[in-house]
Image (spheres, rainbow, N blue to C red):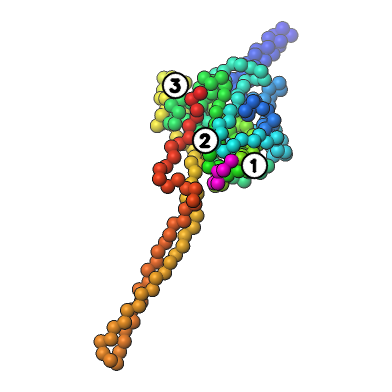
Amino acid sequence: MAKALAVFFLVAISFANYVAGHFYVDSLNGSGSPLRPIASYIGGENSPVSGDKIEREEVVCNAARPFNAFASRLTVAAGDTVTMHWTITEGSREPIGSAHYGPCHVYIGQGLKPGGWTKIFETTPDNSNDWCTNIIAKNNNNYRVKIPSFLAPGDYVLRVQLVALHVAEASGGAEFYVRCMDIRVTGSGAEKPPFEVKIPGAWNRNTPGVLFNLYTVSNPGNGAQYKGKYPSWGGKLWTGGAGLIGTITRTTTTTTSKAPSAAATTTTTRTTTTTIIIVSSTTKAATSPSPTRCAAN
């Protein structure tokens, strides 16, 4: 009996330590109302998506019962910076992380179950010189995300994923910490997102960056060491500009007549085709915007 109890307590302690390393978003701009539900352990909302589930619907919003209802929408203006607060357990002030180093990606979609997503923000060693996990921990567990100033008004689903890579050297080992939030965007933006990233579908267990060995450097917690070494994945970052939306073909006909003799006339027809690229009036033509990056404070 005593031996059985000892084993039970060891298992319980190990489970508690395992769970304590996990984390989740518990508020958006200080409110829990916009958050969609997520799967949870008993007593805490911090169950990541891993294994074959990162290729299934569980990775969309990490919901125990996905897509069954909208949350309350938080109104934000295009160009605003919103704050996602992360925690280990309710009320905890302990910094997140515990060696769960990895990047963050933020997407927007529309509808109860979006058919496509657009990546609007990301934090990687290339654009922030560190892992997203470290940046969040250094900012009191806050992750600040800028809503594009050119985004058209409307109701959107805001989706964040922090991908922990501490066991990602094995296929399916990456842990996706995901949360979806409902927002209403106001303002004078005029560009509609392309919604071309399919989730699930944009990655699998063996996609470079999802499958990744952290331990090729002496200190995997130093994100700067991975600059130029950690691959980009999860769809292209949308930086605005509608780009090519159509073509017009114009045909010009030139007729030339020759009369070598009074009895014969030769007519030559030349056709010139001009293709015009149509770009929306809101496209930024002068310069290309720099990639979005996490705010430093």
Residue hosting label 3: 222
User: Is residue 33 visible in this depiction of the protein?
Assistant: yes
Name the residue furthest right: 1
Packing grade of label 2 (10 A; few <14, some 14-19, many >=20) is many
Type of amino acid under label 3: Asn
Mark 2 or mark 1, which is nearer the start of the sequence? Answer: 2
Instruction: Name the residue rendered at 63%, 29% in the picture.
Output: 28
Q: Position of residue 257 (x, y in %)?
A: 31, 82
Reading the image, the residue beneath label 2 is 121
Name the residue at the front extreme.
188
Magenta region: 187-191
Residue 46 lies in quadrant: top right
For the residue pair 174 and 294, the one nearer the viewer reads as: 294
Q: Nearer the viewer, mark 2 or mark 3?
A: 2
Front-most of residues 75 and 28 = 75
Counting residues from the start of the chain, the first of labels 1 and 3 encountered is: 1
Give percent across and percent down for residue 223. Answer: 45, 24
Q: Is residue 63 visible?
A: no
Q: Amino acid at mark 1?
A: Asp
Q: Tell us which disc is closer to us: 1 or 2.
A: 1
Residue 178: % across, % down: 61, 31
Which numbered disc, 1 or 3, marks the residue closer to the eye? 1
Residue type at numbered disc 2: Phe
Q: What numbered label is drawn on residue 155?
A: 1
